[in-house]
Amino acid sequence: MSALESLAELVRFAPDVYGFRWVNHVAMFIVTDAGVVLVDANGQVNPRTPHLIKEAIRSVTAQPVRYFVYSHSAFDHSTGGAVFADTAKFVGHRNTVEPIKAAKDPTTPVPGIVFDAKTTLELGGRRVDLYPADLSATDDYIVVHDPQSRVAMFVDLMQPRNVPFRTLLGHPDRIVERLRWLEDTLQFDVIVSGHATPQMSGTKQDVAEQRRYYGDLTDAIATARAAGLADGSPEMVTLVRSVLHPKYGAWRRFDEFVKLNVEGMIAWRAGKAPAAH
Ligand SMILES: [Zn+2]
């Protein structure tokens, strides 16, 4: 295998909608005649990434960033927005405020525009709709939607050909409802995940495949229970793995996360949210 690896990339998802990638994290920005809306700074893995994003934006427009939107509070995505504080207002779900405040990181401003119901940013005659994902009581993920360009962004939850992260990022029933809403209601052609491996964006087809994984995982656990296997036991995990493998074995982190996915599915359904992610 070649040692050549692309570390950074500027891509266009649609006219005026771009992504900037550093290794496996992707920020999205929307250019309007009155400024730029940017989602995430991704400055934890590499503190210079926010500066690269700022320069990437400058390479396609002279407009300043007017809104900096937090996709959620996790620091691999949220860190480093202060680079845009000269021109930007900071926007996030109400539940992002406490974790960002508690981190006391001067490079990561606490959002001043907070919301817990659908809200719309208007800039240069364009709208960007922000929808809380509502995956649990403490959830702070949002879905970002640019209806004009038919681009959406749902960080972490909608990574094509990746199994869900660890013990699931919210209640599985809420996640499935949210993915169904993406499929059936939200108008988009491209969905951006905030990550790049194996691909930076997907389509409604990828959303449907992601949703089916949760259903297939649920069914596989039911099959294991019907065979008398104890919840979370190695035998259950082995059976679930073998049931899911034909369809999902090639998905990223299948081997790493199936056991945690089983544990998470059981814990959320039992009303016990797994330890915070
Ligand atoms: Zn992530």
Image (cartoon, rainbow, N blue to C red):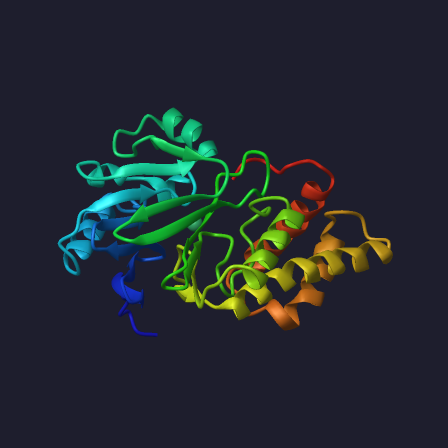
Total numbered labels: 0
Q: Where 105 sits versus 13, above or below? A: above
Q: Residue at x 14, y 59 (%)?
A: 59
Q: Residue at x 21, y 41 (%)?
A: 84
Q: Residue at x 27, y 40 (%)?
A: 81
Tell me which corner region of the image, top left, top right, bottom left or bottom right, holds residue 109: top left
Q: Residue at x 19, y 49 (%)?
A: 54
Percent of width and height locating residue 110: 34, 30
70 left or right of 180? left
Percent of width and height locating residue 267: 69, 41
37 left or right of 240? left
Quadrant of the image containing the N terminus = bottom left
Tell me which corner region of the image, top left, top right, bottom left or bottom right, holds residue 148: bottom left
Percent of width and height locating residue 157: 51, 53
Q: Where 161 sits versus 61, above or below? A: below
Q: Nearer the viewer, residue 88 or 9?
A: 88
Q: Where 253 sits versus 266, above or below? A: below
Q: Where 57 sits versus 137, above or below? A: below
Q: Nearer the viewer, residue 6 or 108?
A: 108
Percent of width and height locating residue 257: 57, 54
201 left or right of 138? left
Farthest front residue? 125
